[in-house]
Amino acid sequence: MKTINKISFQDIESIPQLIKDFLNQKIEGFEENIFSLDNFKKQIHLKQNSFTLSQRNILSDNLKKQLGNLKLSGKQKENLENLRLPNTFTITTGHQLNLFSGPVFFVYKILQTIKTCTYLKENFPDFNFVPVYWMASEDHDFAEINHFKTENSYYEINEKSGGAVGRIEVSDTFFISEFENEFKDFVFGTELILMLKEAYKIGNTLTEAIKILVNRLFSEFGLLILDGDAKEFKNVIKETFKDELLNFSLYKNSKEKVDFLTGKYGKVQVNPREINLFYLSETRDRIDFDGQKYIIVDKSIQFTEEEILNELENFPEKFSPNALMRPVYQETILPNLAYIGGNAEIMYWLELKDYFTKINIPFPILIPRNSMLFLKEKTLNKIEKLNLNIEDFFQNFTTIINAKVLDNNEILNLLEEKENILINQFYELKIIAETTEKSFENMVKAEEVRQLKSFKRMKKRLLHAEKIKQNELLERLENLFLDVHPSKNWQERIYNFSVFFADHGYSWLETCLEEMEIVESKLIILAI
């Protein structure tokens, strides 16, 4: 495996402008929340002064309990104990409990979290930095997480859903035998099959399954795995939840940022609700307020103000943060400095800056995660033979195809030559026309538009004709695009990590870690 290129997010057309502006410090108020050693130095000071010894002990004790049934590495045990110390901080990423980890970027974001901790330790040797994976165990959209894809197959489980997905128990293991048939003959196929069988044993919850899998892959790196669906952690954030129920604080204190981002970028990633909490029973349902009572949406459950506050006091585990409240929950229970997430995640974090200020919690440094792409040598050779660059596949590829089809086309060259002559002729005519009556000047301008439209139609028709004539080239270009973008999407959003692990095993993880960028957000392209 070798690195072919590293493309900055600034040079990729599909990266949202909001992310580019954030990274370029073009959004006022977030200058101290982008990646820099100076910003980390400030963040260490802020978090050190705001995170108590009591919070540290609660975190370490309960993480130790959550991880108690796993075989922990020496580094994990050390990190658990270090969390009690005032000079220890976390770097966090989070993700859904996708079946067998889902798309491969799940692995990339965890590796970036691990490498960021190593980088910070090198630059701040007097402090400890612990990588944390936050499991989205309280999500309730099972259809989003119940499958994964390889190059040749689609795997899915069917379980009863509607509540917190982490609580769902595995009963359907048919997908494992299918997976075994696909991977049994690969070099590291047996390892993958054992991973799958160990994690998705009948009776395991999906939380337990992902915990087992992630620990198998990353324990040696010291990664700690946290489940927020826990009474002990919910106890820590009860006052914030109470404020949310009574005062709609997140909604009110994020409104200015939401309005600003909507005005400048057209929309926000997640619109805050008046109450950004769910109620957990056998299902997970939104909490609403009708002016008099608190209503559990889609259920026949209602609370008076006194009743819901008693429920929160006695059963905090029944209250679940939504997408916007989850960052607040995370930063409340962790001595966290930075969050590493996908572009969509970073965009909804940006809405929350003022709310964090209101509740007196330091807003973290935000790091858009890196992307990775593994291409076969034969794919890279095809790209080279067609005189294309890998960067072309991350621009508007329709434009690239059209340019390739019309490359050195004699008719197009002639059309453009005649079109330029026409533009020059009308330029001269318009100068003279300005000296006469206005209606004649307008007629000259209208005629110019009409004749130039004819050239536009001819070029469009020429492109259509050349695409028919060069059908073979067109097919090669389209197939090549699908080699780079399976299912017309980024590779990392389609394939599961097993596609790469099957041939290369843990050395593939080491390569990803070694090539991962830390200071800048980039797309890293490697030959495999």
Image: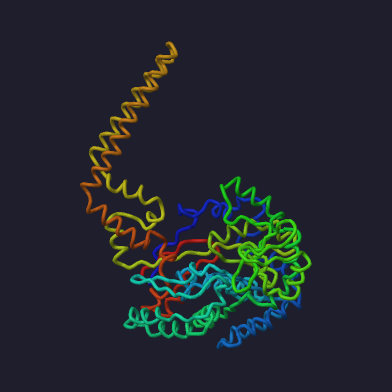
**Colour convention of the picture:** rainbow
**Residue 17 position in % (x across, y down):** 53, 51
Judge whether 288 appears above or below 495 on screen.
above
Please state which of residues 52 and 24 is positioned toward the viewer in this rendering.
Answer: 52
Residue at horizontal 51 percent and vertical 74 percent from the top: 160
* Residue 500 appearing in the image: yes
**Residue 484 position in % (x across, y down):** 36, 62
Quadrant holding the C terminus: bottom left
Judge whether 147 appears above or below 520 on screen.
below
Does 88 sit left or right of 457 as displayed?
A: right
Please state which of residues 502 and 145 is positioned toward the viewer in this rendering.
Answer: 145
Rendered image quadrant of residue 31? bottom right
Does 212 sit left or right of 457 as displayed?
A: right
Of all residues shown, which one is farthest toward the right?
306
Quadrant holding the N terminus: bottom left
Label tally: 0
Of all residues shown, which one is farthest toward the front?
300
**Residue 312 position in % (x across, y down):** 73, 71
**Residue 493 position in % (x across, y down):** 44, 65
Rendered image quadrant of residue 433? top left
Rendered image quadrant of residue 417? top left
Please state which of residues 459 and 276 is positioned toward the viewer in this rendering.
Answer: 276
* Residue 326 appearing in the image: no
Residue at horizontal 33 percent and vertical 30 percent from the top: 420
